[in-house]
Amino acid sequence: MKDNSFSLAEFGKNFRSKLIEAIKNDYNRLKKKIKSEQPCSVALVLDSDFTSLFLALNTIEYLDKKKKGLEGERERINVKFSEYLSKEELNEFFGDSVKNLNSLQWIPDEWRNGDNDLKNSEISSVSQYLSASVEKLRYNYSEFEMEEKIIEEITFSLKEIIDEGFWKNDEMFFFVSMSDDDRAEKIEKFSAEKLNDKLAYETFLQKLQ
């Protein structure tokens, strides 16, 4: 049975308004949590059902800590195994860990900070609105129409916040992603291109190769 009282346009307007406010408020609370650390990446991540999302925040200090930990581990293994393994074998052994470190900036699930660290996260409340809205919209719209609208609204919510100068750091990178789903790459490409300058976007594309 169709429910013509709730349109995709109405959903988009309400969802974007709620999401923008939630992103700002939860981000400000996360900023207090990380104290003097310098944010470098912000992502909004959807689940594969398009019914919930979370805000993730990465920092330069966290990346540096991971890098130093890897370098220390590499030195310890070099000392322990250098007389048994060739330089080429050691480099091959470390290849995956170096690749994982270089891609850490682009994998929100690996970041240390997110709205799930906050009590009464506003993003969590928006997720509840999203879930309820999707149930209503299914009466009138296809899955494709709903998913396309949701991705668009999340992306342009971030863009609206960026354009108003909320984030003062021009070096930050923004994108939308999806957890454990093959559609993540397409969503990331679309959003990253809209939200970042050309050079940053091209750097981001390298991690997808």
Image (cartoon, rainbow, N blue to C red):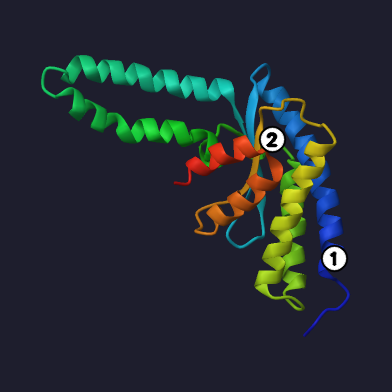
Q: Nearer the viewer, mark 2 or mark 1?
A: 1
In this image, 144 relative to 107: left or right?
right
Give the farthest residue toward the left: 84
User: Secondary structure beneath disc 2?
Assistant: loop
Residue sitting nearer the eye, 4 or 39: 39
In this image, 97 relative to 200: left or right?
left
Q: Amino acid at mark 2?
A: Leu
Q: Quadrant of residue 69?
A: top left
Q: Residue at x 76, y 55 (%)?
A: 153
Q: Residue at x 24, y 20 (%)?
A: 77
Relative vertical location of residue 82 with respect to residue 190 in this rendering, above or below: above
Q: Amino acid at mark 1?
A: Ala
Q: Which residue is mark 1?
A: 9
User: Secondary structure beneath disc 1?
Assistant: helix
State the mark number for residue 56: none
Q: Which residue is mark 2?
A: 118
